[in-house]
Image (cartoon, coloured by chain):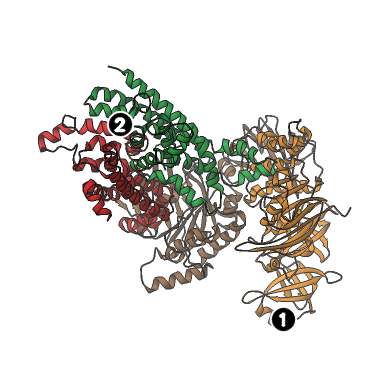
Chain colours: A orange, B brown, C red, D green
Amino acid sequence: MPSQRIIARFHHTYPDFSLDVDLDLPGRGVTALFGHSGSGKTTLLRLIAGLQHTPQGFLSVNGEIWQEGARLLPTHRRPLGYVFQEASLFAHLSARGNLEYGMRRVARGKAMDRAALDQAIALLGIGHLLERRPHQLSGGERQRVAIARALALQPRLLLMDEPLAALDLARKQEILPYLERLHDELEIPVLYVSHSPDEVARLADTVVMLERGRVMAQGAVGELLTRLDLRLARAHDASAILDGRVRDHDPRYRLTRIDTPAGTLRLAQIERAPGERVWLRIQARDLSLALDEPGTSSIVNILPARVLALEPLEEAQLLVKLGAGADQATPLLAHITRYSADRLGLVEGQELFAQIKAVALME
Amino acid sequence: MQTLSARIDFTRPDFRLRAHLRLPDSGITAVLGPSGSGKSTLLRLLAGLERPRAGCIRLGEHIWFSRAQAIDRPPSARAIGFMFQHYALFPHLSVAENIGYGLARGRERQRRVAEWIERLELAGLERRRPDALSGGQRQRVALARALAPRPRLLLLDEPFSAVDASLRQSLRLLLQELVSENDTSAILVTHDLEDARQCADRIGVMIAGRVRRLGESAEVLADPGDAEVARVLGWPNTLPVTQWAGDEACGTWGRVRLSRAPARAHEVVALLPDGPRPGAREGLEVEIAQVIEMGAYRALSCRLPDRTPLRLHLPRALPCPARGARTRIAVPPECVIALPARASVRFNHWSPHP
Amino acid sequence: MMVSALQPCAFDAVLLSLRVAAVTLVLFVVSGIGLGYLLTRPFALRGLLDALVSLPLVFPPIAIGFFLLMLLGRHGPLGAPLYAHLGWELVFSFEALVLAAFIAGLPLVVKPVQSAIESSAREMIEASYTLGKGKLETLLRVVIPAIRTSLAAGLTLAVGRAFGEVGITLMLGGNLIGETETLSLAIYNRVIEGDSTCATWLSLLLGGISLSLFFLLRRLGRL
Amino acid sequence: MGFSDADLQAIWLTLRLASLVTVLLLLIGTPIAWWLARTRSAWKGPVGALVALPLVLPPTVLGFYLLLAMGPNGPVGQLTESLGLGLLPFTFWGLVVASVFYSMPFVVQPIQNAIEALGERPLEAAATLRAGPWDRFLTVVVPLARPGFLTAAILGFAHTVGEFGVVLMIGGNIPGETRVVSVQIYDYVEAMDYGQAHWLAASLVIFSFLVLLVLYSLNHRQALR
């Protein structure tokens, strides 16, 4: 159905920044709004929620119009769920009170939808926390309650504003599996604001990249994370993400071989079954280049590749985009110094070998 | 070599801290411990912001505190840099003035301030007041201010706790670089194991006012020394042993075999969560309480017959018992480590490897 | 023109109020910083001192004035020895007016200074020590600059209170025309006497003073 | 010695005045505080200033202008007379009006601070949970800002009980109508009847002490800022 889309058009100039977006997003699955701080991703999310207004704009969600010109539906009439960066639970209510706050209002005096409540509680694993007050919960637990609170409303659109940003690594690891479950089990569209490439790669189907209030690119995850013209690729931790399958294990060397579109890679043995799908991440700074196939080297992963593009970075650095694999089109990124580029005499189209010093399994 | 050595006895009505340690003049030492264990107090004692009841603190030849010799150098005379949890930047001074505060007036100061501003990428912000800075910028100013007077020892009190996780990583790297560039040593108090794992050369663990373990990071992480320290370092399964039968440890929870009998009859065994597998013929009897999907693996919360919880990591590829199932867990001997419940506290002497 | 209009009715009162305000201002600066700092340090009777300083914020001025009158009067437990040994009678004097204004305004200076030091200056003082600076330099370069807005705002409020005080002043000062009749009391007295022209002039003057203090406070960002 | 009938009458009058003023102030002050805490309008400055004015304006000056305004030639006086209410000065209602003005900042500021401290976020969260504007105010703002409301009520009450300057100007000294406890004490002192004054002053002090105690136990920082 053509109306199963989210159409959002906002043009507005704020004192310190201007927003100019015209988006047509899929009406299901997880769409990540990705960008650096100040890129306008949170503003966009708040406009969609109606927490902020522009005098002009258009917003329709799966056929329902939420804003048209200056006429808009107030936030509390929009069938959405919103998860803030910090949990924003009501301090005077228990976890249960928080969950039921919105449900009562959706039910409007009729009986609450207990099944939806129980499902949200089970999905986020918070059954044992219901009687606690927010201050008795850890940061990760608070965020899980906040997500359940939004889900229990059975919203038609779920908006999440960097729900993991305020948490430390351990708490993130605690919540990510629940978010992946949401991705797998939810029918409704989710807009997920993030500045972490890892989170985006792990959770999203579609990515919208924002910079200074404008949409720089929109597309599928794997494709966008390596596009050279995007600022992300120049970042310190720029990486290529590879979609792979476990081929087999080599018990003698405790190695696992993984087939990827770029070629077969060896990793220190991982506990995954052959045939299982995995995501690998290769950081640009972990790639070095050689013109001839290195004979003896301690590096186990060496792939033939072709230089697709060269892009100067700050000072003496270059970003090289390589194409690897059968059709020499699977993108890889390398950061190298200008000095080595000159020594190797790199030009576009040149064929060479990429030595991969480290491959990380994305968990 | 400017070794820091400290013997400290400090008391408050509800708290006592006793520490005896020696640290080398380079690298980062992370001090971990539960809240209230006295890690911040230790830092403040070293800085001279609190006064020990007895003991002696010295850095190389310089005696900072000595009860016996009646020496108590004020913080201003200790050649330290201190970074506070909330930075304590001076709100009425600009970025440049904050960084230059600890330096003597003169042309030299201007030059040094300019160097630090460039090094920490604060160019363009020189005239800003702290309240016009972002969290990460404030943190860099605080770091520059503490390092500008070239302290011999940098003390950091939970410096990463007030910024969000994305900034934390880059600041850890920055701290490592600065410590090695400036040829100083640093003590980093933190409650986040990740800080210690990622940027410390050494780890110290404090519990209830005592430094219970101090050593090279890898060494401490692999061998906590006793069960309490193991828990601070995030080891999940520590089981009390009631009886030893050769290389077999027994308790109300069952029995497990070690790869060889421990030299002494330790009171606790720790089970590493990654090796044991459910669905065995024999082994520990458990009930599966919860299964959490963690991506690459599943985290199993189990209960042993005496209700002690046991946490296991099971690769996704392996069959997983259902919640509520009763099964047996095969525990490979190399996954069992015997530990004393509480090791006696020794003098925590750091010594470089030969 | 204003001065000439005031001349016949209450020029003395205007001068008297200005003198009281000037003297109390000096007292406020010294005791505001001193007490404000003292109250952030741990010592045995801190709670009691804190409560005493804060009393005039909630206690009815008439009651405070009455008890001070009983305490310091010629037959009071403190007033009697003062009178017997020094021949000094505090009540119904200029000093009594200063005391009244001082007590009423003191918490308005001490409290903001105290909370400014508590909220931020404590850590900043330690930071200054660890950066190699001694106590005096820290006081001058960190403590006073860090609390200056709070101090200035507190002083402005307190001087405003000193001008306006009625209850304690009435009790301790006695409202003696020409001697202890402050500007604030003079307005009341003129109204009672039915001299509304003079009352109007005095109200305009005192209102003007308050308004300028008020705008000063707004510039300090405290209102 | 105990309270005379006149004393009891003064005490009763004071309590009646203070309770009425507190209720009125909460009703008037809450919307003002709400508006001040959240508006970005250019009027915020002037309105906030007007509310805070009594903090620095001497009570005799405030009293004098209220007297003029409510008197037979003042705009308020002409209004009340034309409405057949008579003149307000030297009546109980005159005291009420004056006290409301004088105690306004002590009520508005704690509520405003509490609402500001609350921030926008709980309200936004409530909006995304389908709560309309009134619903948000009653189920989120009121319970979360309760300490602020309590502080406001207590401070408003205490200030009305202790206020003297304005009462003297507006109320005069009419037994049972405008002679509150403060004025009664003043009268006793004028008449050199210190014993009777002691009784009343002591009871006023004990009352204020209890108020202070409650405030301290509630939240000593917030209350005395």
Quadrant in the rendering for residue A342: bottom right
**Helix, strand or loop at disc 1?**
helix
Circle 2 sits on which residue?
A: C63
Is D105 left, or right, of A319 in this rendering? left
Chain holding disc 1: A
Residue at 36%, 69% (x, y): give it.
Answer: B105
| Residue pointed to by mark 1 | A344
Quarter of the image with the N terminus of chain B is bottom left
- Residue at point 41%, 41% (across, down): D74
Q: How far across and down, in percent of the image, does residue A247 sit?
A: 84, 58
**Residue A334 on image: x %, y %:** 71, 71
* Mark 2 surroundings within 10 Å by alpha-carbon count, few (fewer than 14), some (14 through 19), many (20 or more): many
Q: Position of residue C32 (x, y in %)?
A: 31, 47
Task: Tell me how far mark 2 sits from mark 1, CA to CA.
Answer: 92 Å
Question: Contact (CB < 8 A) between labels 2 and 1?
Answer: no
Q: In the depicted view, which residue is nearer to us: D20 or D121?
A: D20
Say whether residue D144 is visible: yes
**Amino acid type assigned to the residue bearing label 2 in the image:** Ala
- Counting from the top left corner in percent of width and height, residue B352 is at 51, 59
Label 1 Cα crowd, 10 Å radius (few <14 / some 14-19 / many 20+)? few
Q: Nearer the viewer, mark 2 or mark 1?
A: 2
Query: Which residue in the rendered view is the most extreme toward the right?
Result: A1
Residue kind at label 1, given as amino acid type? Leu
Relative to C79, residue C146 above or below: below
Q: Between A323 and B78, which is closer to the camera in this rendering?
A: A323
Which residue is at the far front?
Answer: D82
Horizontally, residue C124 falls left or right of residue B314, namely: left
